[in-house]
Amino acid sequence: MFGKRLKHAHRYQEITNAFLKNGMGYFIYRLGLSDGKSTSKVAPEENLNLRSIGERLHKILQSLGPTFIKLGQIASTRRDIVPEEIVRELEKLQDQVTPFPFEKARQIIEAELGDSLESLFLEFQETPLATASIGQVHVARLHSQEVVAIKVQRPDILPNVETDLEILDDLTRLMEARIPWARRYQIRKMIDEFAKSLRAELDYNSEGRNGERIAKQFIDNQGIKIPKIHWDYSTKKVLTMDFIKGIKINHYKQLDEEGYDRRIIADRLANSILQQILIDGFYHGDPHPGNIVILPGNVVSLMDFGMVGRLEEEMKYQFASLVINLKRGSTTGLINTLSNMGLLTDETDMSSLRYDIDELRNKYYDIPLSQISLGGAVNDLFSVANEHKVMIPPEFTMLGKAVLTMEAIVEELDPNFSIMKAAEPFGERLLKERFHPKNLAKKTWNQFIESAEAISELPKDIRDVSDIIKKGKLRLDINIPELQVFLHKLDQISNRLSFSIILLAFSIIMVGLIVGSAIAGQANILWNIPAIEIGFVVATLMFLLMIYTIFRSGRM
């Protein structure tokens, strides 16, 4: 860890300065990266203002470049753990960067594709069409006359991103060691997932494959268009695809002026995203207006598949179950779904959770479907889960962000369009497919095969255990919580009982001897031995020895 800090000392200093400059030195101090002298300028009550924290984080992440901008954008999808006021500020993070020189773009393209720009393309526009933190897009014409968009990765961005990811790994280790909520939410695990996602986004081959996979989902749908990838002109750092010229979906006035039907566009966009999520389980993770254009005939074109979400069969079913139970207002159904997902633990206060979900249900009770936000309802459910320390799967957080982003666009296109109503048939279809006899038989057969494999391995497992026992290597480790405390209390009780018995016996013996000698009217001598005196001395020594032993053990 220290080696990383020494290796990236300059970048650590940049990060520290960004936090100090924006009045968040206390965070740096908590991580041990500052002496705390710069934190006194910020009043504690100001730090508690979530909106102020969000604004400061926005400035900090924006100033630190691509990795931290992407981190903020991902964090804005985690409404289950990030307060709404901070989310709204993080959503404003944009790739506000200047284009890199054309000569750099030329060098990268020629090095990647192994030929001169003039040999590769009939025409090439030197001024980029769009610029982002990871790369920029140029328009060109192939010798086949096809017009293409070429995404070129920024020079030297990979080592810079790797440096930042190493630093983030270090910082999250510190956070989990020093900040309780960071341990509870497994912040380091989240950063690991973020690192995988960002590295995948830096591989344009991966983005191209994502685009082709989603294109196959709509191969028979004329209302949805996905740009074709030109693999002969694509590598990890250069991605060439069909150039799609249309109207940005949020240019509503232009759509109206040119006679487009907003209702059809809203329906096609919503259904395309819902199909990706609930049917195919592979969806566009960032369907913001910049990634969607409208073509003649109200055709919706989706672009930029660097960020995608995945849902396995079980997760698709559970999400559909959440949507249907939200729509029906079934508290029991929602709790059962959370339980089936394995999100509830023995520590979950079921009574309190049921009460809060009932409150959520009442919020949406008897409200027309057209007025219910699917993304908002799902995020409300995530917020309730967060309050009860129920960890929502990371697959669902990106999904919630994608649905909310899509909903905001659809609402502007057609205010009367109901996402909840549009999602219902997809959810019901998914449930019907799950319980179709063919699928049930397939699931039963798979379970039978798994069980058969387990049974076939049983003799070998038993033989292995038998060998271990014969060799005397079997070790039984029983761990009972608070066992030491229990044993300590047991020692105390037994020692006090022993003390009482000894004291009682001592008293009985002495009293018996004294009374007996008094009745007999004889001296306290037995066989010429002073029995009472000697007995008294012996009993006293035993008593003192026992008391000393008990007190020395510390368990009185």
Image (cartoon, grey):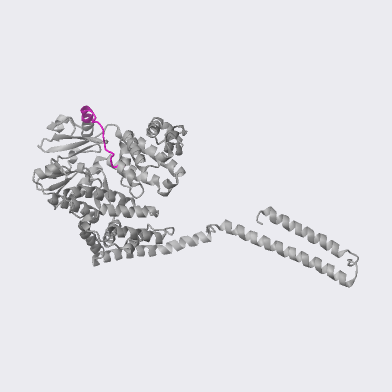
Q: Quadrant of residue 44?
A: top left
Depicted 108 relative to depicted 508: above or below: above
Observer-nearest of 137 and 422: 422
Label total for image: 0
Q: Quadrant of residue 544?
A: bottom right
Tell me residue 223's x, y (percent). Answer: 13, 50
Tell me residue 310's x, y (percent). Answer: 28, 51
Observer-nearest of 356 and 514: 356
- Main secondary structure type of the part rendered in magenta: loop
Q: Is residue 100 magenta?
A: yes
In the current view of this chain or complex, which residue is farthest to the bottom?
519
Tell me residue 510's x, y (percent). Answer: 81, 65
Q: Quadrant of the N terminus?
A: top left
Q: Quadrant of the C terminus?
A: bottom right
Q: Residue at x 77, y 65 (%)?
A: 507
Depicted 430 relative to depicted 125: above or below: below
Tell me residue 441's x, y (percent). Answer: 27, 66
Q: Which residues are magenta?
A: 90-107
Q: Is residue 124 left or right of residue 352?
A: left
Q: Is residue 504 magenta?
A: no
One can see residue 341 in this view: no
Observer-nearest of 59 and 397: 59
One can see residue 271 in this view: yes
